[in-house]
Amino acid sequence: MKIVGYRSHLAQHEWGRRIGDVNYTSTATRTPVPVLVLLTDEGIEGVGIGAHEDIERIFPALDGEDPRSVVALYDRMCRYSFKLGHQGAVATTIGALDMALWDIKAKSAGEPLWRLLGGRDRFVPGYASALDAPLDDDALVAVHEEFAARGFSAVKLKGGRHLDRDLQRLRLVRDVYRSGGAEPALMLDANEVWHRSQAVRYIARLEQELDLTWIEEPVRRWDAAGLAAVRHGVRAGVASGENLTGLEQFAPLFAADALDVVQVGWGWGTTLALRVAAAAHSRDLPISPIGFTPAITPAATAMPNMLTIEVQDLAFPLGLHVDQTIADGGFVLGDAPGNGISLDEPALAALAQDPLSRAAADVQVRPGRAGLRVTAEDDRSEDRPPRLP
């Protein structure tokens, strides 16, 4: 079997709400979902999800190769980009291709990928994460009532700018999930908005009233000393790692004993996720995948230290069939060969006739004063996103 080409599609995710975090808020309710299809001379096609702007640079590493040599081909793609480093657009391209390679490998074996990777249980436990920063109180409660009805008992909110507002929102969702009888797990994701002492002060204030399971990305992703300082200054666990695109980037965080929960982003591919999970497991640390996690659930079933997986929405993207269901507080994987993601060709064709229009405000730009604010209202940067009405 040989790789002979690729094609691209653009699916869309209809959230039914605006989404965002402390740094960014969408202006529309629909976002694009890039899809990469890897072609072989035997007609087996592999599906990968994620941006792949650097496909012309990376595809020669795979052209004519046997797609079943997945791990070796992952390393080959990294070697093709070693001068640039496997990060940014290069990393997302490698991730999409890696995902497609694993899909082909499992399809050629006639097995679901979760079985091929050695998973035993088709259920992957998760937590609710609705990217809910733009929502008012009523909408916030309504969204999380839907998650609670699907059996979720853990929730992560976006926050980090306005302490009183975060306290109010955390109380609201705590009450939603408390209605099931048990005390829910509460997490807060600050998306790298604080500096070290600011993070400790903010979290300590939250902890006067709430029990937080973890605080996510309190400082910059590479700040091993800062993450360690926060970890030792608060009761909550510290989670980070979703934006690290290579195993070597985790080494300073491990060396600094900076993490309680190791996170891995789905968009960097299955091979990296498995390697990070193994590295974390060697240190008795749990792993928690982040992002469009239906793409990484097959690998999650094979991770012995899998803690919980992010669930951002209860629906799947338009233009895709996903052989998974969301129930009992997590994903239940099906038996379709491969990674369980297939194309809805008529839907993709219809979407192609009505391309997604994205406003400039939807570009995710880190505010210039992030990590440099003295007060919550301090936002003097000229490149800040426009204020919402």
Image (cartoon, grey):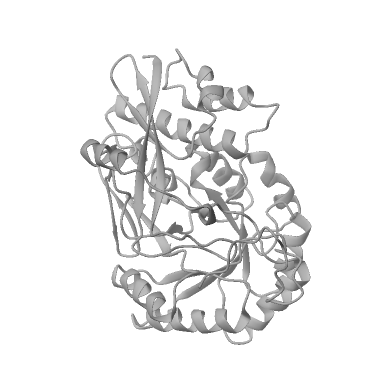
Image quadrant assignment for residue 15: bottom left
Left or right: residue 277 versus residue 3 is right
Residue extending furthest toward the bottom: 209
**Which residue occupies 45% across, 70% down?**
155
Image position of 284 (left or right of 324): right
**Residue 243 image offset from top left, x and y in percent:** 60, 49
Q: Residue at x 76, y 61 (%)?
A: 226
Q: Report whether residue 87 is seen.
A: yes
Q: Position of residue 259 (x, y in %)?
A: 66, 59
Q: Is residue 183 visible?
A: no
Q: Which quadrant would residue 113 be assigned to in this image?
A: top left
Residue 12 higher or lower than 189, as above or below = above
Residue 306 picture location, percent across and down: 48, 53
**Where's residue 118, x and y in %?**
39, 39
Pick the front one: 120 or 389: 389
| 16 vs 337: above or below | below
Indicate the quadrant containing the N terminus: top left, top right, bottom left or bottom right: top left
The residue that appears at 54% across and 29% down in the rendered structure is: 54
Number of numbered discs: 0
